[in-house]
Image (spheres, rainbow, N blue to C red):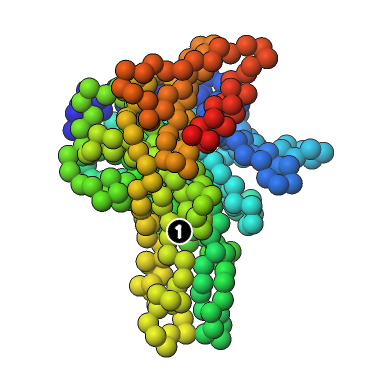
């Protein structure tokens, strides 16, 4: 492992973690989501003593936690602690998503543990929390910059009488950057099938390998921010698939994958079957990656700010971030010498409005 690079990534992680404790509300991109009925879910950093009722001299009152605020017009606001965050370890970047059919809230976050940082997910369903750790690669590791999205897939299964029936399942797609032996983006899908959360099927995949490329990852000469922000979003042309954009440091290219899953379990079962065998169910949870585009790793994106990205159906990735009073953005099909475009923010052009404009432009190109 490149120790100076690991140290820079860790410093960035700790800086984000420390900054989140200085604010009273959501401060990280993608840390809020709205349900169809208007319920607003917000995840924000807090002190344990500010969220829970504790004795005045409680020794863990200052422990950093993540809190969930649930707001619906006309009803009292509720605040609760996100599962797995009550300890002395500091949480970093957060991404959340809501599966509307079952009301399942998915919170992905990173947690510092000594020199390293883990990837965690907390799942809230029916006001009950459960947790799931995502296993890192072996050795020293640092997980940062998670992003999550949810899609719905139709698939064919057997019914109780052994006849084909079409069902729908939800797929939470989690992507993040992991600095370990190799430096690479990782991907983990989590499924909700027949109304049941399938945490038994959770597995993490190295996106370089899912793209069919193995070898030494080489970030030499690249700013950390140029390669450490993978992105994921629904692929509207597929059956519940996603578009994943990441820096492939084996090929030294920005790469976009269309990730899908087996959707006809009956056809994949042996002739004469009346139920899906376990090995076919396992295959149904394996991501299928196909190249959808690429381009240059944005070497002109050197920033301490949080970076977001939007992927077009043509496979181009547009990265955008805010520095001071300026929105900046670059594209994966820019020439190497190109400078970041800039939008000056004004009272009538907020960062949120500028993001919407840049995303709309990115989706068309």
Between 77 and 231, the residue placed more toward the observer is 231
- Who's the residue at 42% across and 40% down the image? 315
| Left or right of 146 on screen, residue 193 | right
Instruction: State the residue position of label 1.
Output: 199
Residue 34, image x, y percentages: 66, 41
| Left or right of 39 on screen, residue 52 | left
Q: For the residue carrying disc 1, how many other residues have a C-alpha within 10 Å: few (<14), some (14-19), or many (20+)? A: some
Let me know if residue 134 appears in the view.
no
In the displayed structure, would residue 15 be above or below residue 234?
above
- Who's the residue at 53% across and 35% down the image? 364
Between 300 and 75, the residue placed more toward the observer is 300
In the displayed structure, would residue 258 be above or below residue 272?
above
Residue 278, image x, y percentages: 38, 74
| Left or right of 250 on screen, residue 229 | right
Between 253 and 26, the residue placed more toward the observer is 253
Q: Quadrant of residue 262?
A: bottom left
Q: Residue furthest bottom?
A: 272
- Who's the residue at 27% across and 24% down the image? 222
């Amino acid at each position: 492992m490149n120790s100076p690079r690991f140290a820079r990534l860790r410093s960035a992680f700790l800086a984000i973690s420390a900054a989140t404790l200085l604010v009273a509300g959501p401060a990280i991109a993608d840390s809020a989501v709205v349900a169809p009925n208007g319920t607003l879910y917000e995840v924000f950093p807090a002190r344990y003593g500010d969220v829970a009722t504790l004795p005045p001299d409680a020794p863990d009152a200052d422990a950093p936690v993540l809190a969930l605020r649930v707001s619906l017009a006309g009803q009292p606001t509720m605040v609760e602690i996100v599962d797995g965050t009550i300890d002395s370890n500091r949480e970093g970047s957060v991404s959340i998503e809501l599966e509307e059919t079952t009301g399942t809230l998915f919170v992905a976050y990173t947690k510092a543990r000594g020199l390293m940082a883990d990837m965690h997910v907390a799942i809230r369903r029916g006001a009950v929390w459960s947790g799931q750790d995502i296993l890192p690669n072996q050795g020293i590791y640092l997980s940062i910059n998670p992003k999550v999205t949810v899609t719905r897939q139709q698939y064919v299964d057997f019914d109780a009488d052994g006849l084909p029936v079409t069902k729908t399942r939800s797929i939470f797609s989690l992507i993040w950057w992991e600095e370990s032996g190799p430096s690479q983006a990782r991907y983990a899908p989590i499924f909700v099938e027949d109304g049941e959360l399938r945490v038994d099927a959770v597995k993490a995949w190295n996106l370089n390998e899912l793209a069919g490329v193995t070898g030494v990852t080489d970030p030499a000469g690249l700013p950390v921010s140029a390669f450490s922000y993978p992105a994921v979003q629904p692929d509207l042309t597929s059956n519940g698939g996603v578009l994943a954009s990441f820096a492939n440091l084996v090929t030294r290219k920005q790469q976009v994958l269309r990730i899908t899953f087996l959707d006809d379990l009956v056809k994949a079962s042996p002739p004469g079957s009346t139920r899906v065998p376990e090995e076919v169910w396992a295959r149904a949870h394996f991501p299928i990656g196909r190249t959808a585009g690429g381009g240059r790793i944005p070497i002109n994106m050197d920033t301490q700010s949080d970076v977001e990205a939007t992927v077009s159906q043509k496979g181009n990735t547009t990265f955008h971030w805010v520095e001071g009073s300026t929105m900046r953005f670059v594209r994966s099909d820019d020439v190497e010498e190109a400078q970041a475009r800039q939008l000056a923010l004004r009272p009538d052009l907020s960062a949120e409005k500028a993001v919407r404009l840049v995303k709309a432009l990115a989706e068309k190109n």
